Structure formats: C-alpha cells, structure tokens
Amino acid sequence: MNLLGIQILLDLEQCNVHVLDDIDYIKRLLIKSAVDSGATIVGESFHKFNPVGVTGIVSIAESHISIHTWPEHFYAAIDIFSCGKDFDIEKSKNILITGLEPKHSRILRLERGLEND
C-alpha cells in the first residue's frame, strides 16, 4: 500500500458531561490538540445544538480533527486524520482523551492510501 495518511476514530463513553456541552471548551480542546501536536490550523467551524450537543472541526494543513458530542449519552465521537509527517497524531489523540475524561474508549486506527500504486 502507498500509505497517504493515518486516521484515528475515537468512541469515548461516560465522558465528563459538563465539558461535552461546552462549545468554548470543545473548541479550545480541539485547537490545543492540533497546535500542541505540530499541526498547522487552516480553518475551524463549531456549532452548539439546542438543547444539547456540540459539533466541530479544525481543518489542518495535515487534514482534520472533528468531534460530535451527545451529552445526554455522555458520549463523544472524534475523527483525527493526518497526512503530514510533522503532526503527532498520537499526541493529539491523547490530549483529546484526557480533556474529555472518558471512563471507556474504543480506538480504531486506519491506514489510508492507494492499494495499487
């Protein structure tokens, strides 16, 4: 395989419910996970749902970090995709997990690229 990127999918359960519905906290957390891991931010978009929940994406030169929260289920779904060599995707993942304080997490790591190149 001609490896073009790594994608990590996180299912975080029994998270801190207070942070899952705090758009400012979620935005700061995603930005911190990008910057502290060596990514170059090129854009961002966040939305607070009524009555609860947050969705957001930080677009990075290396690809993206996105989140969708379900505070009513104490759950967050996160997607980190990196096609850059200077972005530490594992560090980004760890910052997000620490910041959301899940009691349980499922992590799926995928290699993305061309099968026949």
Image (tube, rainbow, N blue to C red):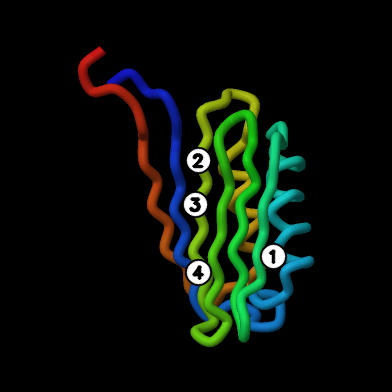
Which residue is label 4 attached to? 12
- The single residue placed furthest to the front in the displayed view is 50
Q: Nearer the viewer, mark 1 or mark 2?
A: 2
Query: Badges 3 and 2: C-beta atoms under 8 Å apart?
Result: yes
Q: Secondary structure at mark 3?
A: strand
Residue 99, label in figure: 1
Which residue type carries mark 2? Answer: Phe
Query: Considering depth in this image, is 113 or 93 the residue closer to the camera?
Result: 113
Measure the C-alpha gap from mark 3 to mark 2.
6 Å
Measure the C-alpha gap from mark 1 to mark 3.
15 Å
Which residue type carries mark 1? Answer: Gly
For residue 40, above or below residue 16 = above
Q: Is residue 38 visible?
A: no
User: Residue at position x 64%, y 25% from top?
Assistant: 86
* Quadrant containing the C terminus in the rendered view: top left
For residue 114, above or below residue 49 = above
**Residue 69 screen position, x and y as percent:** 56, 71
Q: Secondary structure at mark 4?
A: strand
Q: Earlier in the sequence, mark 1 or mark 3?
A: 3
Which residue is label 2 attached to? 81
Query: Badges 4 and 2: C-beta atoms under 8 Å apart?
Result: no
